Amino acid sequence: MARQIQVRDIGRYCEEQMEKLLRAAVRETDSLVKQASPVDTGRFRASWQVGQNSAPGGIKPPGSYSGSAPISRIGYQQEKPGNIYSVHNNLPYAERLATGWSSQASAGWVQGVAKDVQTRVQAAASRIGRES
């Protein structure tokens, strides 16, 4: 049976659905870019950050990093519609790795992640719609 929504609640319902989709899109993007990142010490993978309306942030210190890095939100706690989110890496060699400098990752791997995210966000939108 379909969920019934009062007319006065339509705006809030739509906002909740958009927040769910936005969180899924940011989470998927962060996860996929980390999974696709070339790894030597793990510093590059651990240095991905998500910025809201800007791309500031620090640089992870040298060292060895293992395991999966949790999402690193810079300056905010939760995604909200109306903001712009960027997934970025401030390491000095990040651009070279993203353009195929490493033999571990060919040129274009970031664009491949972007295409994969599009597919996954469409699937997330369908799932969110079915669950509501």
Image (cartoon, rainbow, N blue to C red):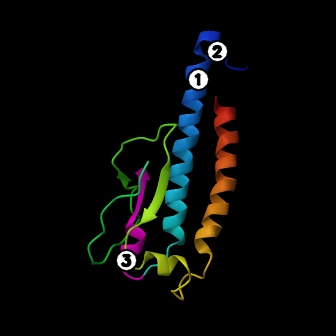
In the rendered structure, which segment of residues is drawn in magenta?
Answer: 40-52
Q: Compared with residue 46, is residue 106 higher up or lower down, i.e. above or below?
A: below
**Whole-Å distance between the Cαs marked 3 and 1?**
43 Å
N-term-proximal mark, 3 vs 1: 1
Coordinates of residue 57 in the picture (x, y in percent): 33, 60
Badge 3 crowding class, 10 Å Cα cut-off, few under 14, some 14 to 19, many 20 or more, is few
**Whole-Å distance between the Cαs marked 1 and 2?**
8 Å
N-term-proximal mark, 1 vs 2: 2
Furthest-front residue in view?
Answer: 54
Furthest-right residue in view?
Answer: 1
Q: What element carries label 2?
A: loop
Q: For the N terminus, which image quadrant?
A: top right
Q: In the picture, residue 13 is in which quadrant?
A: top right
Looking at the picture, which amino acid does disc 1 mark? Tyr
Looking at the picture, which amino acid does disc 3 mark? Pro
Q: For the C terminus, which image quadrant?
A: top right
For label 1, the residue is 13
For label 3, the residue is 92
Coordinates of residue 100 in the picture (x, y in percent): 56, 83
Foreground of the two, 36 or 48: 48
Residue 6 visible to an observer of this rendering:
no
Q: Check residue 120 for magenta coloring.
A: no
What residue do we see at 72% from left, 20% from top? 2
Badge 1 vs badge 2, beta-carbon distance below 8 Å: yes
Badge 1 crowding class, 10 Å Cα cut-off, few under 14, some 14 to 19, many 20 or more, is some
Q: Check residue 46 for magenta coloring.
A: yes
For label 2, the residue is 5
**Whole-Å distance between the Cαs marked 3 and 2?**
50 Å
Residue 48 visible to an observer of this rendering:
yes
Q: Compared with residue 17, is residue 88 higher up or lower down, i.e. above or below?
A: below
